[in-house]
């Protein structure tokens, strides 16, 4: 090849690669300029802006990026399977059927238009769960809560102190236990109020937009006679004299569940919230230690019903600690041991029943007797012993890895009407389903699934720093 040809070939190569070289140079320049521009802007932009989607949010058909969740502290620790959601849908059917849109209240018992503050707390739990599980949308959820808060903000209080024991769900007015209008009211259950406060606390924790209104609802109550000397007190209007009596309220189990609720929001509950208070006693049943309250019902007029519900709610809502852990476990173990020794599946709690006397305390221990089923007046109805649906669900969720939990769920898994909700239970004697259908049973079923998903509500809310804050003047009054 001649020298001229070599030079010509070299020129051709340069011409061929020149565009590529120019492109590389320009590319490096653009990258360098972009990098310097980003560096100069970095201090002016938040990380979320730096890495945000560049889509045009205003363009037709485009959705705005979702804002960070206002209840992001609720991080699921376990997923719910299809079977769980099917159970939730059955429970929510009760609330669809018994909701009163005018007041936001829910019937305590199917088609019976009255409610208590305990059952109103259960209704809030159910509504939170239904929204969380996708059974209702945000609009439906908000409508229900707004209507309820409106009623709680305006309802007449017993003796201008606190909510009456019972209200009409259709009118929001005070009634008696026969659902008859009661202008003066019949009294106040501070234990019932605790359940309402517990779920109002969870409501504002998960949905902070309701915080101000919830605080106002609870701050309108007069706590002076309800909470004092580390204990809770109820109010009762004497049917004859019409005078209001103040009665210490709570026995071991429910007393601690409710006491912890009020303690969490700032009240002295040094006796009521303590399982190791001076009233605690105990005995062995089937070689399992079972705690009970030593206060004499003949003197004080109130029994200590040892049941699953109070201990289960304490564990699910407040979490476990070194004191309640063995107590709750023993409640589970003693019922498991009864099943092992007798073959009787045992999930024991108080319940509505579908025949007279319509409400019974099915207990592990009460009035000196184990496995005693009685009314609040001490009349025995042992033929109405039942496997309680709410107790079965509670124990199964607390101890999912125990074989007995599967036995419990299998015993009640068909105790429902898909259009009405979960029945209260199954009679032990082969008498069929206890078809009483209530807000409390279905609310607890939903809250057990919420517990499975998230764990203890109070532990979550305390970690997030979100809780009820009452008017400071309430505590100044308490200190007088």
Image: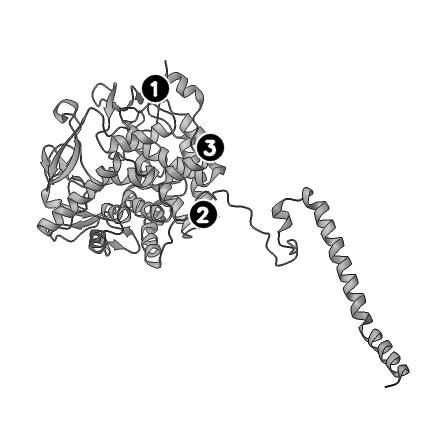
Circle 2 crowding by C-alpha within 10 Å: few under 14, some 14–19, many from 20: few
How far is disc 2 from disc 1 in space, using C-alphas? Answer: 37 Å
- Residue at image point 90% right, 82% down: 4
Looking at the image, is mark 3 or mark 2 earlier in the sequence?
A: 2
Where, by quadrant of the figure, is residue 21 drawn? bottom right
- Residue at image point 77% right, 65% down: 24
- Residue at image point 47% right, 48% down: 138
Q: Going by the image, does 377 lie left or right of 116?
A: left
How far is disc 1 from disc 3 in space, using C-alphas? Answer: 22 Å
Front position among marks 2 and 1: 1
Where, by quadrant of the figure, is residue 262 drawn? top left
Res 165 seen here: no
Q: Are dots 1 and 3 in contact, CB under 8 Å?
A: no
| Secondary-structure class at tag 3 | helix
In the image as oriented, which residue stretches furthest toward the top? 480
Percent of width and height locating residue 424: 23, 47
- Vertical side of 263 occupied by 341: above or below: below
Percent of width and height locating residue 413: 24, 55
Q: Going by the image, does 192 lie left or right of 388?
A: right
- Vertical side of 373 occupied by 256: above or below: above
Circle 1 crowding by C-alpha within 10 Å: few under 14, some 14–19, many from 20: some
In the image as oriented, which residue stretches furthest toward the bottom? 1
Looking at the image, is mark 2 or mark 1 earlier in the sequence?
A: 2
Residue that carries the numbered disc 3 in the rendered image: 213
Circle 3 crowding by C-alpha within 10 Å: few under 14, some 14–19, many from 20: some
Residue that carries the numbered disc 1 in the rendered image: 224
Instruction: Work out whether residue 191 or residue 392 is closer to the camera in this orientation and state it.
Output: 392
Percent of width and height locating residue 325: 25, 38
- Vertical side of 335 occupied by 290: above or below: above
Residue that carries the numbered disc 2 in the rendered image: 140
Instruction: Work out whether residue 152 or residue 58 is closer to the camera in this orientation and state it.
Output: 58
């Amino acid at each position: 090849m001649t020298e001229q040809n070599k030079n010509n070939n070299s020129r051709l190569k340069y011409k061929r690669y020149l565009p590529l070289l120019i492109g590389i140079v320009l590319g490096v320049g653009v990258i360098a300029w972009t990098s310097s521009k980003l560096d100069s802007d970095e201090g002016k932009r938040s990380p979320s802006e730096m890495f945000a989607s560049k889509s045009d949010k205003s363009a037709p058909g485009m959705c705005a990026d979702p804002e960070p969740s206002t209840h992001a502290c609720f991080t699921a620790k376990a997923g719910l399977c299809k079977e769980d959601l099917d159970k939730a849908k059955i429970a929510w059917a009760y609330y669809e059927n018994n909701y009163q849109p005018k007041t936001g209240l829910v019937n305590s018992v199917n088609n019976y238009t009255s409610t208590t503050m305990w059952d109103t707390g259960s209704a809030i739990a159910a509504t939170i769960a239904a929204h969380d599980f996708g059974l209702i949308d945000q609009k439906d959820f908000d409508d229900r809560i707004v209507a309820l808060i409106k009623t709680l903000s305006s309802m007449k209080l017993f003796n201008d102190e606190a909510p009456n024991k019972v209200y009409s769900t259709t009118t929001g007015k005070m009634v008696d236990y026969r659902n008859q209008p009661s202008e003066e009211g019949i009294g106040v259950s501070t234990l019932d109020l605790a359940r309402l406060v517990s779920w109002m606390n969870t409501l504002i924790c998960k949905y902070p937009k309701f915080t101000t209104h919830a605080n106002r609802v609870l701050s309108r109550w007069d706590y002076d006679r309800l909470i004092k000397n580390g204990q809770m007190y109820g109010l009762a209007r004497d049917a004859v004299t019409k005078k209001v009596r103040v009665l210490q309220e709570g026995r071991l189990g429910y007393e601690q569940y409710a006491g912890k609720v009020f303690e969490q929001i700032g009240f002295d509950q040094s006796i009521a919230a303590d399982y190791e208070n001076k009233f605690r006693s105990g005995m062995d049943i089937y070689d399992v230690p079972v705690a009970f309250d030593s206060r004499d019902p003949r003197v004080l007029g109130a029994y200590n019903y040892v049941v699953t519900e109070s201990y289960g709610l304490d564990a699910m809502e407040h979490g476990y600690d070194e004191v309640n852990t063995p107590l709750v476990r023993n409640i589970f173990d003693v019922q498991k041991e009864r099943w092992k020794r007798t073959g009787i599946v045992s999930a024991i709690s108080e319940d509505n029943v579908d025949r007279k006397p319509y409400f019974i305390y099915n207990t592990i221990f009460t009035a000196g007797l184990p496995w005693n089923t009685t009314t609040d007046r001490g009349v025995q109805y042992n033929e109405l012993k039942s496997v309680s649906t709410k107790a079965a669900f509670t124990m199964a969720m607390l101890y999912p890895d125990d074989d007995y939990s599967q036995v419990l769920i299998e015993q009640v898994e068909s105790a429902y009407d898909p259009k009405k909700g979960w029945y209260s239970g199954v009679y032990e004697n082969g008498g069929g389903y206890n078809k009483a259908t209530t807000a409390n049973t279905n609310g607890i079923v939903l809250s057990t699934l919420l517990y499975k998903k998230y764990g203890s509500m109070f532990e979550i809310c305390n970690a997030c720093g979100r809780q009820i804050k009452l008017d400071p003047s309430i505590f100044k009054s308490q200190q007088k």
